[in-house]
Amino acid sequence: KQWYQRRVAITAGISDACSKIMPTQRTFNVDHVRSCKILGSGVLSSTCLQGMIFKRNVESDITSVKGAKIAVYSCPFDIGTTETKGTVLIKTAEELKNFSVDEEKLIENSVKALADLGITCVVSGGKVGDMMLHFANKFGIMVVRLMSKWDLRRLCKSINATALPNMTPPTNEEIGFCSMVALEEVGDTVVVSFRQDREESAMSTIIIRGSTDNIMDDIERAIDDGVNSVKVLTRDQRCLPGAGATEIELAKQLMTFGEQTPGMEQYAIKKFAEAFEVFPKILAENTGLRGNEVLANMYNAHQDKVSGMNAGINLESDHCEVMDVVERKVFDIYLTKHWGIKFAVNAACTVLVVDQIIMAKQAGGPKPRKGQADPDDE
């Protein structure tokens, strides 16, 4: 029952995340669904966020901005340095005071230029200078630091911004927008969230909760498989009966075809049919059931040509039972099954061809002369 509740929660989170970024005029991209693992609570506490979330703290005193206009910099949020070294000779205290004032004015003007454009949040891909941070707090600008260039790129995609390589004021086309940027606390972890309220967002994040890292890793793999399944379904919506029903039906029909085929080819066809029995047998053994008994019950159920084609393994039962997978809504994706069988057959045929070439041609190399010992044997 606990696993069933987890499965329902994971499925709901995947469908919610995919529907929020489901494009109308472009292809579905699996990279637009991100996951963030936060230790604590349980799997049922996992939620979906329309936007992005980062396990970092903010650099400034401002911790939340609503309707934020964001400037993204891939460089440090600090005053630029010259390419060559320079020496400043200061003789009096007044010259030292004026030098510091000029530097402060330069930094203040650069931050004020951002504030005049309506920028309320700055995201930097490098270090944040103390003087820049001081004036950012003065003008009410929130500063967030992201060390990963991949996170910076995904954030630009989410807020529709352009990362600038230099500390220059951005244009209107380069400024990003986010409905809400806030510092939040999920469990004991401090995170920065970028939330979007519009219908179709460029990115969505599934917040994975769990008591251990192993559980969260398993949930992350399950989410990755689910998102890729959604991408496949956007290309081809066809599905096949799952729980081993398709494989047993293929094995039964191939076995019948092999018995009707004369000559030596029938043995290859029958062995090919037996290969399909691996799928339901492995499914049964992974759940603690006896594989041979499950195969016998499934072959018996598939003798019915009307409803037997949909007979699959009932993995939720403690006994070797079969069920109608269409009635229980257990399906496999057609494209996954199609390409899996095709690649497996091509690999087997390639191995057989290579084996025939090796057997047909004797290994080459010069033959040792008679009466002389091989120098490599010494």
Image: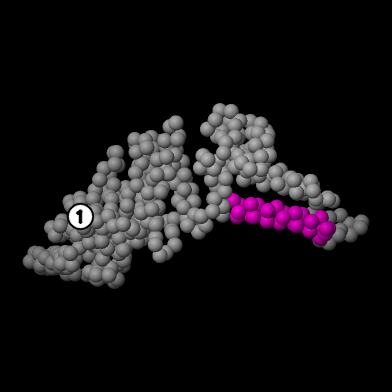
Front residue of 331 and 217? 331
In the picture, residue 187 is in which quadrant?
A: top left
Report the residue at 38% width, 50% height from top.
Answer: 17
- Amino acid type of the residue that numbered disc 1 sits on in the rendered structure: Lys
Report the residue at 29% width, 47% height from top.
Answer: 191
Front residue of 325 and 67? 325
Q: Which residues are magenta?
A: 337-364
Horizontal side of 127 relative to 223 (left or right) equals: left
Q: Is residue 184 above or below residue 158?
A: above
Q: How is the image coloured?
A: one colour
Percent across and percent down for residue 105 are 13, 67
Kindly give the residue lying farthest to the left in the view shown: 94
Horizontal side of 288 relative to 93 (left or right) equals: right
Describe the element under mark 1 as helix, strand or loop: strand
Percent across and percent down for residue 144 are 26, 55
Front residue of 242 and 104? 242
Task: State the predominant SS element of the stretch in magenta.
Answer: helix
Horizontal side of 286 relative to 9 (left or right) equals: right
Residue 18 visible in the displayed image: yes
Percent across and percent down for residue 48 are 34, 47
Q: Is residue 282 above or below residue 163?
A: above
Front residue of 121 and 81? 121
Pointer 1 residue: 66
Percent across and percent down for residue 267 are 79, 47
In the picture, residue 278 is in which quadrant?
A: top right
Kindly give the residue lying farthest to the front in the view shown: 306
